[in-house]
Image (cartoon, rainbow, N blue to C red):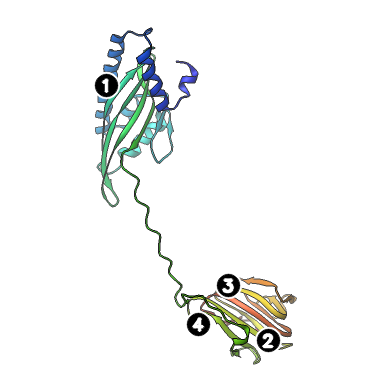
């Protein structure tokens, strides 16, 4: 067989064999090709018997040394060893019953190549109950040392693809409004932020959501000039944006563990959950916090109110 012929895919190769058999008058006589067809049908019967016995070694023996197994929805296997392992995996499935039936076998005029097209059916017990499938296959046979061996084996199902699962409905987070929400700066209603361990003076306003419950929230804090707050942490992460003034922040469970850094209006910070931090304000300072509730403040064990 010519090298380029071996490079063809199974379906294209089967078509080439059919054309060769129909149009070539030279080469192997028709009577000899009929004998080869009968021999391949007999081999098919033997393979079916080996499949019924779930004998992966016997099935793989019918493949050529460089054969390719091309199953659907998984990787191909090349060579008897890999093919044997593939069939062994299939035969281990609960109550599998697999058989196939050739419908058309065409032997090339050269007498050393043939296509085998037919149908298959399979049933087994799946995780959700009985499973059954029917489909078609294409097998390319090649003579190796005078014996017919499978060079390529490919099949696919007749069953339609399963219907895609319906898209999950978009469900608003608990507590979220279902309509657009606008809060003007003139409508903000500030109230004292009272928290054990924090000096009075901080003002807070909730812009969106309920910080005391689950779901997303947005709130603002206003600090008077010169205010300092102790080291503390929050169970969930904070998205912090400086609105005005200068926000001072240091990281650590003890005030002064790190030098304070200064952030101006427009600066953004993300503080991961459970990360201790402390700081203060230079000038009247406002920050906006956004995160997932509940919003809680836990004093660090080494912090001290100032």
Callout 2 secondary element: strand
| Label 4 CA crowd tier, 10 Å (few <14, some 14–19, many 20+) | few
Q: CA distance from mark 3 to mark 1?
A: 69 Å
Residue appearing at x 49%, y 20% in the figure? 4
The residue singled out by tag 1 in the image is: 41
The answer to whether residue 234 is above or below residue 94 is below
SS under mark 4: loop
Q: Which residue is mark 3?
A: 237
Residue at the location (60% across, 82% down)?
Answer: 184
Q: How many marks?
A: 4
Tell me: residue 155, above or below residue 4.
Answer: below
Q: Nearer the viewer, residue 245 or 71?
A: 245
Labels 3, 1: front one? 1
288 displayed left or right of 124: right
Q: Position of residue 66 (x, y in %)?
A: 44, 24
Q: Which residue carries the number 2 mark? A: 223
The label number, if any, that marks residue 5 in the structure image: none
Which disc, if any, is residue 212?
4
Q: Quadrant of the N terminus?
A: top left
Choose the circle earlier in sequence order: 3 or 1.
Answer: 1
Find the distance from the CA under tag 2 to the CA under tag 3. 21 Å
Can the viewer see residue 208?
yes
Q: Quadrant of residue 300?
A: bottom right
Q: Position of residue 156 (x, y in %)?
A: 35, 36
């Amino acid at each position: 067989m010519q090298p380029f012929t071996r490079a063809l895919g199974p379906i294209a190769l089967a078509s080439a064999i059919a054309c060769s058999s129909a149009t070539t008058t030279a080469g192997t006589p028709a009577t000899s090709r009929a004998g080869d067809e009968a021999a391949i049908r007999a081999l098919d019967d033997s393979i079916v018997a080996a499949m019924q016995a779930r004998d992966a070694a016997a099935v793989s023996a019918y493949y050529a040394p460089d054969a390719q197994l091309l199953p659907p929805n998984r990787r191909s296997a090349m060579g008897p060893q890999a093919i044997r392992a593939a069939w062994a995996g299939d035969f281990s499935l609960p109550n599998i019953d697999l058989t196939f039936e050739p419908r058309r076998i065409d032997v090339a005029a050269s007498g050393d190549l043939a296509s085998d097209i037919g149908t298959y059916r399979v049933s087994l017990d799946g995780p959700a109950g009985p499973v059954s499938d029917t489909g078609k296959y294409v097998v390319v046979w090649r003579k190796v040392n005078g014996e017919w061996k499978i060079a390529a084996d490919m099949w696919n199902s007749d069953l339609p693809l399963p219907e895609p699962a319906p898209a999950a409905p978009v469900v608003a987070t608990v507590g979220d409004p279902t309509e657009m929400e606008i809060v003007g700066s003139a409508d903000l209603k500030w109230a004292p932020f009272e928290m054990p361990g924090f000096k009075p003076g901080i003002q807070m306003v909730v812009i969106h959501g309920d910080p005391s419950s689950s779901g997303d929230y947005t709130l603002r804090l206003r600090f008077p000039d010169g205010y300092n707050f102790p080291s503390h942490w929050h169970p969930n992460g904070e998205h912090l944006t400086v609105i005005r003034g200068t926000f001072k922040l240091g990281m650590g469970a003890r005030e002064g563990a790190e030098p304070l850094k200064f952030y101006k209006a427009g600066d953004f910070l993300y503080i991961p959950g459970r990360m201790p931090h402390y700081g203060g304000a230079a000038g009247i300072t406002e920050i906006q916090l956004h995160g997932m509730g509940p919003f809680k403040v836990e004093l660090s064990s080494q912090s001290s109110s100032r």
